[in-house]
Image (cartoon, grey):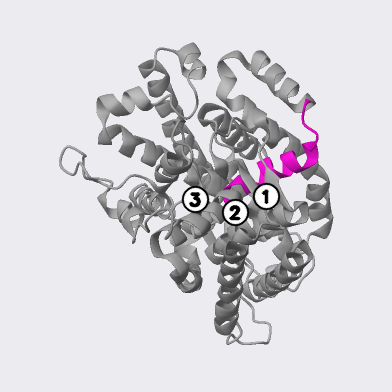
Amino acid sequence: MTIIYGMMMSVVIALFVFVFKRAMHGQNMVTPLLGWLTGLSFFLILPLCILILNGGYQMPVSYGVLGYWGDLDLSDPAYIFPFLLIWASLALTAFALLAVLLKRHRSPRLAPCYTASLPKLRIVILVCSAIILTNWIITIVSVGGIQSYFLLHWYTRFDELINQWGGIFILFQHTTGALQIILTAATALLIDANLKRLTRKYGILIFALLMIVLNMIMTGNRIYIALLALYVGISLLMQRRFRLIIFMMMVMPILALFFSAWAHVRSGMGDISTAIENYEYSREGESTKLINTLVDVTEASNVMLLFHIIRDFGSRYDLLYGETYTRAFTFVIPRSIYPNRTQSFTVTTAELYEPEAHTSLSSTALGEMYANFGVFTVILLPLFTLAVLWTSNRVMSMFSRHALLSAALFMLFAWMSRSVFAANFIAIILCVIIIWGLRFEKDLVYPAANNKLHHPNFRRTRKVRASDRHLFSG
């Protein structure tokens, strides 16, 4: 069975490689569509391949998984249908994209090129950082100080504030999350400018990277670093900077170990030394350290839950028929007015699969689609992907006015591939409002002085003439 699964996945991988090549054709900037494709590749295809090669996976006892979803045996015939549905959804998605992308002009075209304004990027990064820091200070004071803040579990530390302030605090947190995405997007554009040798000033870049690391410490969420790394990786691939890509691949094992450890120690930041000791002790009894690390880094547990959702919904559990998607439009209505408002899909799945724990469980975008619409997911995933393509084309056609939004959408679409629709849709709306309201896009990028210097077919970007430096140095 593993061999058959592997052969079928090789077809999907080949299709996605071809799709990536077509999606990058004629482009010299990272697009929102590439974010969605990268998210599907990293959070669905890659962990699925890992699980197939391992024949399945069983969560170690030290992970504290209480539900049966933590065990996946791919030799069990019960999981044939879930695999076939996942495979068909991905294959049809690739074919749908190719049907559209292959209609583009086949000869290389000179895409419009732009250079970033370093002073404006600096303003965006500093403004976002100032608001985020203010939010952290207010939150720390509200929970009783820095010690209390870190003693509380990262997932439940805001429960009391939510009970006290209700929807106002939730909206406040959504807004802060949008600012963190914008900060990460601005940092990505700054890194991209450095990679293209459009600037050699690293002070603001170091500050932005420190803010993203600090954000991981304060929120317990490593996703922002992962999204930034995915953006940089795609940017390097588009520039054909293969030496840097190889260097990143050599560094990845170290980052993988760090991210794996962080997933276990982030809940014990109030006593970090004890948390690390507990993590090391739990790892000593594990016989499959490598596969455990790969599962942690790629969040393959989401794909494991996806298999169980496809197996259970429609038989063991009733389909939701789009209920969780309505949260994108009803989240602003207080529960005092709308007491039966649908809760997040991650909370719904946690109540079904781990009712004894106060947590949430992700199952990729495919999991939410199937739980709502069943086998129609095979059609819905390609249709949604085409909607992403349309959005990407619209944004990129006005890149000079939407450069920051384009980078933010890359990250949000990548995030949406592993998470739920409503939360990311809300984040997109808030990002648009913040970017527009604070005029972050105004004078952010300028047309490049010589498009040929940045044509995607050139293997290396040349240095920009001194006379052109006003375009990015302000």
Tag 3's secondary structure?
A: loop
Quarter of the view holding residue 282: top right
Residue 409 in percent (x, y) is at 49, 57
Q: Is residue 339 left or right of residue 398?
A: left
What type is the residue that disc 2 sits on?
Answer: Phe
Q: Is residue 383 above or below residue 185?
A: below
The residue singled out by tag 2 in the image is 472
Say left or right for 453 vs 137.
Answer: right
Residue 145, placed above or below residue 118 = above
Camera-side residue of 184 and 420:
420
Rendered location of residue 301, percent (x, y): 61, 45
Q: Residues within 10 Å of mark 2 (few under 14, many from 20)?
A: many
Marked residue nearer the N-terminal end (3 or 1) = 1
Asked if 173 appears above or below 461 in the picture, the reply is above
Residue appearing at x 75%, y 35% in the figure: 257
- Dominant secondary structure (helix, strand or loop) of the stretch shown in magenta: helix
Q: Nearer the viewer, residue 146 or 47?
A: 47
Residue at image mark 3:
419
In the image, is residue 290 part of the stretch drawn in magenta? yes
Q: Position of residue 246 (x, y in %)?
A: 83, 53
Q: For marks 3 and 1, give the CA distance.
A: 35 Å
As helix, strand or loop, the secondary structure at mark 2 comes to: helix
Q: Residue at x 55, y 36 (%)?
A: 221
Span of residues in magenta: 285-302
Determine crowd level at label 1: few under 14, some 14-19, many 20+ residues with C-alpha closer than 10 A. Answer: many
Disc assigned to residue 199: 1
Residue type (three-letter) at the residue carrying disc 3: Ser
**Mark 1 and mark 2 in contact (Cβ < 8 Å)?**
yes
Q: Which amino acid is tagged 1? A: Thr
